[in-house]
Image: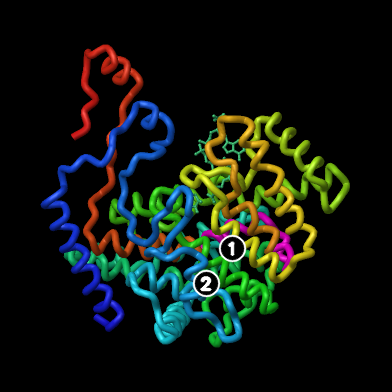
Amino acid sequence: MGAYKEKFKEKADAAAAEIRELLKEHGSKTIGEVTLAQVYQGMRGITGLVSETSLLDAYEGIRFRGYTIPELQVSLPKAKGGSEPLPEGLFHLMLFDDLPTEHDVNEMTAKWQRRSHVPTHVFNTIDALPLSTHPMTMFVVGVMALQTESNFTKEYAKGMNKKDYWEFAFDDAMDLISRLPRIAAYVYRRKYKNNEHIQPNGLLDWAGNFAHMLGYEDEGFKELMRLYMTIHADHEGGNVSAHTTHLVGSALSDPYLSFAAGMNGLAGPLHGLANQEVIKWIYEMREQLGTDVPTSEQIAKYVQETLSAGKVVPGYGHAVLRKTDPRFTAQMEFGKKHMPDDPLCLTVWNVYETVPPILKSLGKIKNPWPNVDAHSGALLVHYGMTEYEFYTVLFAVSRALGVMASLIWDRALNFPIERPKSVTTQLVKKWLKGEDEIWGE
Ligand code: NMX
Ligand code: MLT
């Protein structure tokens, strides 16, 4: 076992011992009641999971191992000449629960570079799909093809001791993160850039090299990728992509299978696909109105039309947050610094002024404020990435950092298979009449 894994094992053993003690002393303590409405309505507000890598506060937003996004922008190491955090540093923080030094981050970059080889059959598998396939489908198919490389699955077939699960999950997670930018860039260049591919540059950091393989050499775009990969990485454990990865992993499906499952959830329009929906919605609005910079009145009218058509306003609302998402704010600040006059950004900021009062006035929407997806597309378009169907793939590459760090912890803490109880409405009716019990041992 290398020094890296030893460091993790030491942390994980200490955490496991602490949790054992905690459960011994407080395991029977009740932490909340569950109402019938919560059971029918997406389990909102039920605390039922442990995820160590980040924690969401409804009003403050996300903290990664205790650090807010502005704090990370100060504390995490940057690329030479850059001012945005390197995502390698965030992964280090989420995995080891300590702030990395510049040396730690360089070491992570080097490790991921060494592990980044993608076997040819992965590209061949993607090539077998029609060009019209959605980029997220191509991406997940690529990840599934890469599952042939799982060390966890190979060791399990040989007969692995439970105590060693975490070690092979660790190997798979590191391999997967190292290889995802190549797969994502392959999908992008195949679908949108005439199948002309760009070889990796071993001198660049993980996000910088990703930008390079996508075909964007502008230093501004590389900085954007570093910020983007950092802020989209994790949003505690209950969101669809993190929860799915965790759930599938709990069956001891290997990290490739678990990640692919989670990313199929990210591909839903109420989750990560919302970033493409936002830009599509703005483009359609601009086309209908015949202007690149619609006024507040025009935006308000278009929002009313969207709502009247029974559609959601993409990029607004959240299941947990109750204020502007700090990931939106971080991107708005990036926009104001690098592209203050960009017409699409000006529209995003005008939508931010216009939409919340309208949504609030409806009375039923719990959070009228923008989430992360309301802004990301406008920054990408500024640098020339207009192919909005690809945006969720960028989200997926970033989300790997959080869900893989979490999955390593799941295996290290020996979390069991996840299996909540479900009920039928027939049972609920009998229970309400006192004729039966809702069993939940
Ligand atoms: N536009 C219109 N209606 C909305 C919106 C919105 N942006 N957000 C919530 N509602 C509706 C919602 O559909 C529901 O209506 P009904 O009672 O008729 O079914 C009602 O308001 C109450 O919903 P909430 O309890 O406020 O929201 P919930 O927790 O169920 O859903 C989202 C959260 C994020 C799914 C929801 O706000 C939404 O659909 N937003 C638009 C899509 C989006 O931006 N998703 C991205 C989330 C972030 N991410 O990256 O994953
Ligand atoms: C996320 O980043 O996963 C989204 O904001 C959705 C969520 O947290 O539920």
Asked whether the beta carbons under mark 1 and mark 2 sit within 8 Å of each other, the answer is yes
Q: What is the residue that sits farthest to the right in this orientation?
A: 290
Bin the neighbour count of mark 1 within 10 Å (Cα to Cα): few under 14, some 14-19, many 20 and up: some
Q: Residue at x 70, y 59 (%)?
A: 378
> What is the quadrant of the N terminus in the image?
bottom left
Whole-percent x and y of residue 25? 12, 51
Q: What is the residue that sits farthest to the left in this orientation?
A: 24
Q: Residue at x 24, y 71 (%)?
A: 11
Q: Amino acid at mark 2?
A: Gln
Name the residue nearer the viewer: 417 or 14.
Answer: 14
What secondary structure is marked by label 1? helix
SS assignment for the magenta stretch, majority: helix
| Residue pointed to by mark 2 | 73
Q: Does residue 79 sit above or below 124 in this rendering?
A: below
Q: CA distance from mark 1 to mark 2?
A: 9 Å
Mark closest to the chain's N terminus, 1 or 2: 2
Name the residue nearer the viewer: 258 or 319.
Answer: 319
Q: Does residue 200 sit above or below 254 in this rendering?
A: below
**Residue 231 seen in this snapshot:** yes
Region rendered in magenta: 380-397
Magenta span includes 409 = no
Q: Which mark is residue 402?
A: none
Whole-percent x and y of residue 427? 29, 20
Name the residue nearer the viewer: 422 or 118.
Answer: 422
Q: Does residue 422 sit above or below 160 in this rendering?
A: above
